[in-house]
Amino acid sequence: MTVTGSKTSLGIVGLGAYLPGEPVPNDSIAEGAGVELQWIHDRIGIEYRHHAAPEETTADLAVRAAERAAEGSPVTPDMIVLATFTADRQCPATAPFVQERLGLTGVPAFDVDAACSGFVYALATATGLVHSGVSQTPLVIGADVFTRFINPQDRRTAPLFGDGAGAVQLGPVPEGYGILATELWAEGTQTSLAAVPRGGNWFVMDGRGVAGVVMEMGPKLLNTALAKAGVRLDQLNRVVVHQANPRLVRNLSEYVGLADEVMPTYGKRTGNTASASVPVTLALAHEERPFRDGDLIALVAVGAGMTAGAVVLRWYEGPRA
């Protein structure tokens, strides 16, 4: 890829998402979870989500998202970083299966697991590896089939989650564009707030405790990343946050003082897609109202661990394949 100017930075040059199957409405969830449809609407705000078919794997979803990201990309991946906490098997990682199916023989491929913050962690990892000279055009994917770890009778979790995958292809962009700053955080003393317990089959969550961490650490990580990037909050054109649930996203936007058009909510039609949430939301936001050249965009996620991360970037709408 050729860009103008004497220096280049690292930015998003391809973007794609995949949501499996037909939408699963609330009435398919409510009875099994022992809740009323109105309760899901009022307390959570999700209208539908997508569930992977029994034969679909995390790699299947990841490949579909990666293929869509490649459609407009002017570069070929030289590394795959896959964020997931629903790996298809304990060993090996899922990324090598994605590599093989994409025909990228010999390209380094590995998984990153930071729960719902995983994609932001993977993006920060890929950025660091580019700066260290290991890679130039990494493909970063977030993919999960998390509904397989959700007890359909648990009213606290069954209505929340969906499956999906999102991917971004990174490549050279003109200096001043692309990824401007990243910031990561974790706190191991809070691991009990959201987890699949040792020996357990189902995900359990302290919803109120998780919401408290989101409201505290989301803005804190965002402000730190903005300071690193030399950008003010009121300069942001779009803030893409992990879609934990629509009500929480709205609370967060009100707390930091951002309008709905700046911090879009797509969780009402995707559910919480875990590691896929940020790239899926990014792709949907771009599809609905395309980013313009020079737009300042922030990505923010909080997940189990507890973990959190933020990325600030300037969008480059340059030549595409």
Image (cartoon, rainbow, N blue to C red):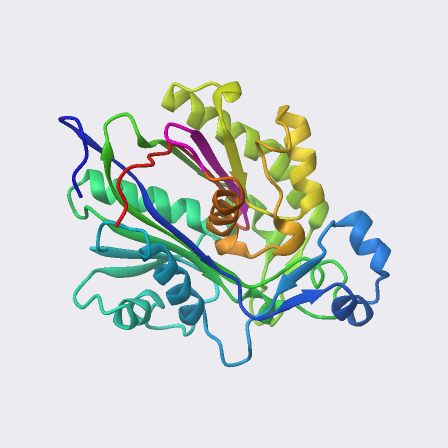
Residue occupying the point 51% across, 32% down: 238
Is residue 309 or residue 107 the one in the foreground? 107
Is residue 271 visible to the viewer in this orientation of the structure?
no
Q: Is residue 314 left or right of residue 213?
A: left
Q: Is residue 292 magenta?
A: yes
Can you give x and y, in whole percent of width and height, for residue 67 in the image? 35, 62
Q: Is residue 86 left or right of residue 158?
A: left
158 relative to 306, above or below:
below
Residue occupying the point 28% across, 68% down: 102
Is residue 275 visible to the viewer in this orientation of the structure?
yes
Residue occupying the point 49% across, 29% down: 222
Can you give x and y, in whole percent of width and height, for residue 213 in the image? 61, 39
Quarter of the image that includes the N terminus? top left
Residue occupying the point 50% across, 52% down: 280
Can you give x and y, in whole percent of width and height, for residue 92 in the image? 32, 72
Q: Is residue 66 left or right of residue 285?
A: left
202 relative to 316, above or below:
below
89 relative to 315, above or below:
below
Is residue 133 or residue 320 the one in the foreground? 320
Is residue 52 or residue 200 the one in the foreground? 52
Q: Main secondary structure of the magenta part?
A: strand
Image quadrant of residue 58? bottom left
Image quadrant of residue 35? bottom right
Can you give x and y, in whole percent of width and height, for residue 239 in the image? 52, 34
Q: Is residue 239 magenta?
A: no
Q: Which residues are magenta?
A: 291-303
Taking the view exactly as shown, the residue that stands out farthest to the bottom is: 55
